[in-house]
Image (spheres, grey):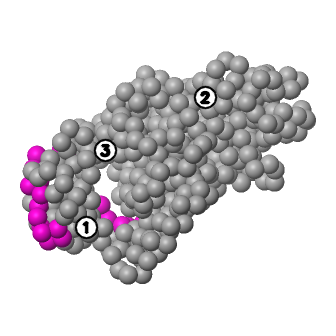
Amino acid sequence: MFDVIIAGCGPTGAMLAAELRLHDVRVLVLEKDTEPASFVRIVSLHIRSLELMAMRGLLERILEHGRRRPAGAYFAAIDKPAPAGLDSPYAYLLGIPQPVVVRLLAERAIELGAQVRHGCAVAGLEQDDEGVTVELAGGERLRSRYLVGCDGGRSTVRKLLGVGFPGEPSRTETLMGEMEVGVPPEEIAAKVTDKRLSLRPAGAGVYRVVVPAAGVSDRAEPPTLEDFRQQLRAIAGTDFGVHSPRWLSRFGDATRLAERYRVGRVLLAGDAAHIHPPTGGQGLNLGVQDAVNLGWKLAAQVRGWAPDTLLDTYQAERHPVAEDVLDNTRAQMELSSTEPGPQAVRRLLTALMDFDEVNRYLIEKISAIGIRYDFGAGPDLLGRRLPDIDVRQGHLYGLLHRGRGLLLDRTERLTAGGWSDRVDHLADPTAALEVPGLLLRPDGHVAWIGNDQQDLDDHLSRWFGKPAD
């Protein structure tokens, strides 16, 4: 019997498996595909996702395969530079092939002891008070204490649970791919005048091409190069001599959010819980961040020290975040319309983004560094993620590789006491903080601020359960 079965070995499922293995949870990941995707889609890792990779000691291996770009033009591709002094040493965008992200995260999960089985599709599930029985397409039945559906927008797990997925279906569709072109850059610049069309260099003579599709079709069927040529000719009067595609895909503007993230012992994460257009490049990032929020909480439940309501905070915290992402992608899609009204709003917003406060607000929203969970009344830092500040040992995130809580104590008088098996303690009066002490959750969010030991003990109990005997 496994502790947790994860359906889907995409970025969310692989990250969740690695997070669970940090706490010795017995994990099996089931992936229905036998081979990696045939196309190589480039995705963008935003600031918060890069911070999470740094927290787990994964950033260096990720950076080897990516290409850094300035942190700007996030919102609706409005071309504004990032404001000065973004509160992170990872204030850039990392373009990286999605299959590489999946491979690196899956390798990490396997290194930590997770089992991954390919060619295994979930076909049924039954749960009881003790666990979940998962039936595979071939008839095999597996048993685990919990099941997490990370199996994408068409999630079988979500459908088997009967969880509603309300929202809007696709009304429009867009073709996106990377390919070579047969004309010089100046001709592209002269003829790309329609805001619905984009041809941008992607390195080594390759361009990323984005063009509206002729209509809405089955997204399971990838477009052809001829589809791109026809639409380019229809909009720009030329197909720019496109050839030799690296990958081709289509996406719609469907926007949906699961009504519940948890039903008993079964949970949802990533695209299984939310889908939205890729505008702003938030999808993969949102799923990875779901996984880091859920991982330590589910591990605590399995290990037996979770407070009664801890697992419920996963939905309480992440569902509103997804709602906000869906809303900002809806807004960005409206701003891509060629109708006079949306274009007038786009011009107004473009002007407003010259104000530092507006530009900063939008970039912090898209990059997820502006998230503040509701932990009750307290200083503004409470509920927010703590940046990778300088500490005596070097950098803060280097202390979070094991996925444990951290008491950061400038007073040198506080203690983690009976929670030291779950919470590390750093007494460092030199730490770059403006508060006497704080408690970090394993996901890097500030759970307590102060200098009173009794108050700290109350919050340790709230987040990390009863102290050890």
Q: Say what secondary structure mark 3 lies in.
A: strand
Looking at the image, the residue that sits furthest to the bottom is 340
* Magenta region, residue range: 233-257
Query: Label 1: few (<14), some or many (≥20) within 10 Å?
Result: few
Q: Amino acid at mark 2?
A: Tyr
Which residue in the protein does label 3 denote? 42
Q: Say what secondary structure mark 1 lies in.
A: loop
User: Residue at the location (18% across, 42% down)?
Assistant: 205
Q: Nearer the viewer, mark 3 or mark 1?
A: 1
Please check the rendered image and state whether residue 293 is part of the magenta-colored stretch, yes or no.
no
> How far is disc 2 from disc 3 in space, using C-alphas?
27 Å
Which residue in the protein does label 1 denote? 193
Q: Amino acid at mark 3?
A: Ile
In the image shown, does 121 or 93 lie closer to the viewer? 93
Q: Say what secondary structure mark 2 lies in.
A: helix
Q: Nearer the viewer, mark 1 or mark 2?
A: 1
**Which numbered circle lies on residue 397?**
2
Task: Give the mark nearer the N terminus: 1 vs 2.
Answer: 1
Query: Residue 35, position in %: x, y?
Result: 23, 38
Asked if 394 appears above or below 317 in the picture, the reply is: above
* Marks 1 and 2 in Cβ contact (< 8 Å): no
User: Residue at the location (25% across, 40% down)?
Assistant: 203
